[in-house]
């Protein structure tokens, strides 16, 4: 079956590689959608030159405009939201339901998730498949835990950490993208499951953070807890688990120790007035002070018992391009959706929608480095 897939933000930093990988791995048709017609058409021309069949077309879509959304969703099977449009999730999701199509996004936003959860009954009743919190993180940490758990007779601890070092100078950010990045920090919940309960920490914990060893080239890095909804159900799924959570590393010294301590209090005091100036400062700090080596890593440290012996397993995923590392898991998830092996109606987090072993195998085939030790 040939699927028609609409990608909002289809010519952007994440949408473009998603389109390329879908064209490479499937026979689907792809619509690259965004507000800039010239950028969309230029991307379409390049992709149709690279991939046979003229399977890529362009569409002008503004997520704030219901008319353009409804028009773009006519005749497609799935909308993939790769744009900075979390504020318009209700409009996009409603348009998808009205059009009778499925949905996938990769935005980190507690507000977005709350909106979709409020629509869950309608999604189920319509028989639609909605996949949210896709990508690298959120999207993969709980996959790693689910994938490694069968190697233990008793899983006691499973912590996942990340390091993202990107050459930000070579990237273009729209004002909406910068605003969404800053808004994510307002959503940031510093929760981790420790000694059998979810515990809240504060930004003061950065003065005494958790340290994880990511190996070469980064070695030991400080990390702070970042709650992801996909981690919430793990202690219930694995009752012996007494420590788990996701922990995120820093960007660079300026962003971590100047922008964060100064910008976060300002954002909390006046989010409307301060979002733009804090966003500009963050963008400048990322581009000015980020230095090589550049790579994105995700590491699972798991401990437990097997055959009566204490066991430790480390699993590291890596990719030199942080945006490709976001795109590849989305496409690996969609491969399971498109062949029908995973598709089912309802609202799903990517991390609990996929079959873990196939997800990891497909990501490795698509270019993600996978290192396993201690098995």
Image (cartoon, grey):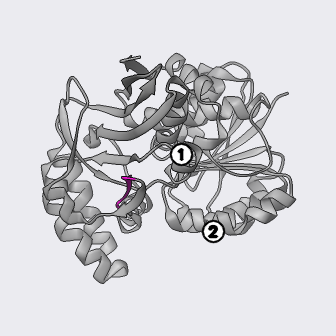
State whether residue 247 is above or below residue 221.
Answer: below
In the image, 218 versus 166, the foreground residue is 218
Task: Report how far apart the C-alphas of labels 2 and 1 lie in the structure.
Answer: 30 Å
Which residue carries the number 1 mark? 239
Q: Quadrant of the N terminus?
A: top right
Which residue carries the number 2 mark? 115
As drawn, is 264 to the left or to the right of 134? left
Give percent across and percent down for residue 72. Answer: 74, 53
In the image, 73 versus 324, the foreground residue is 324
Give percent across and percent down for residue 3. Answer: 79, 34
Q: Report the disc number at residue 76.
A: none
**Residue 153 in sight from this viewpoint:** yes
Q: Residues within 10 Å of mark 2 (few under 14, many from 20)?
A: some
Report the span colored magenta.
190-195
Give percent across and percent down for residue 179. Answer: 39, 64
Give percent across and percent down for residue 152. Answer: 49, 26
Q: Quadrant of the C terminus?
A: top left
């Amino acid at each position: 079956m040939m699927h028609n897939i609409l990608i909002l933000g289809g010519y952007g930093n994440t949408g473009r590689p998603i389109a390329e990988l879908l064209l490479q791995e499937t026979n689907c048709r792809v619509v690259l959608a965004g507000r800039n017609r010239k950028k969309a058409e230029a991307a379409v021309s390049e992709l149709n030159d690279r991939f046979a069949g003229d399977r890529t077309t362009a569409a002008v879509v503004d997520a704030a405009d219901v008319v353009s959304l409804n028009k773009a969703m006519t005749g497609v099977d799935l909308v993939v939201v790769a744009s900075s449009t979390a504020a318009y999730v209700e409009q996009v999701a409603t348009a998808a339901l009205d059009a009778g199509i499925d949905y996938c996004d990769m935005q980190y936003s507690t507000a977005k998730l709350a909106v979709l959860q409020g629509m869950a009954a309608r999604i189920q009743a319509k028989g639609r498949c909605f996949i949210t919190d896709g990508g690298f993180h959120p999207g993969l940490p709980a996959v790693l835990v689910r994938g490694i758990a069968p190697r233990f007779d008793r899983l006691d601890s499973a912590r996942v950490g990340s390091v993202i070092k990107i050459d930000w100078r070579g990237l273009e950010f729209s004002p909406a993208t910068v605003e969404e990045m800053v808004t994510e920090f307002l959503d940031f919940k510093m929760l981790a499951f420790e000694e059998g309960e979810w515990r809240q920490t504060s930004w003061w914990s950065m003065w005494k953070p958790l340290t994880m060893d990511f190996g070469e080239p980064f070695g030991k890095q400080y990390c702070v807890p970042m709650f992801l909804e996909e981690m919430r159900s793990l202690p219930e799924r694995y009752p012996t688990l007494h420590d788990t959570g996701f922990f995120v590393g820093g960007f660079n010294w300026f962003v971590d120790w100047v922008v964060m301590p100064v910008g976060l209090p300002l954002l909390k005091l006046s989010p409307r007035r301060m979002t733009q100036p804090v966003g500009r400062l963050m963008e400048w700090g990322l581009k000015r002070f980020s230095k090589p080596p550049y790579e994105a890593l995700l590491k699972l440290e798991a401990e437990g018992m097997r055959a009566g012996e204490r066991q430790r397993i480390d699993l590291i995923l890596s990719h030199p391009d942080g945006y490709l590392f976001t795109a590849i898991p989305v496409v690996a998830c969609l491969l399971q959706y498109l062949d029908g092996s995973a598709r089912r109606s309802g609202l799903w987090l990517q991390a609990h929608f996929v079959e873990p072993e196939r997800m990891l195998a497909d990501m490795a085939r698509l270019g993600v480095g996978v290192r396993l030790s201690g098995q």
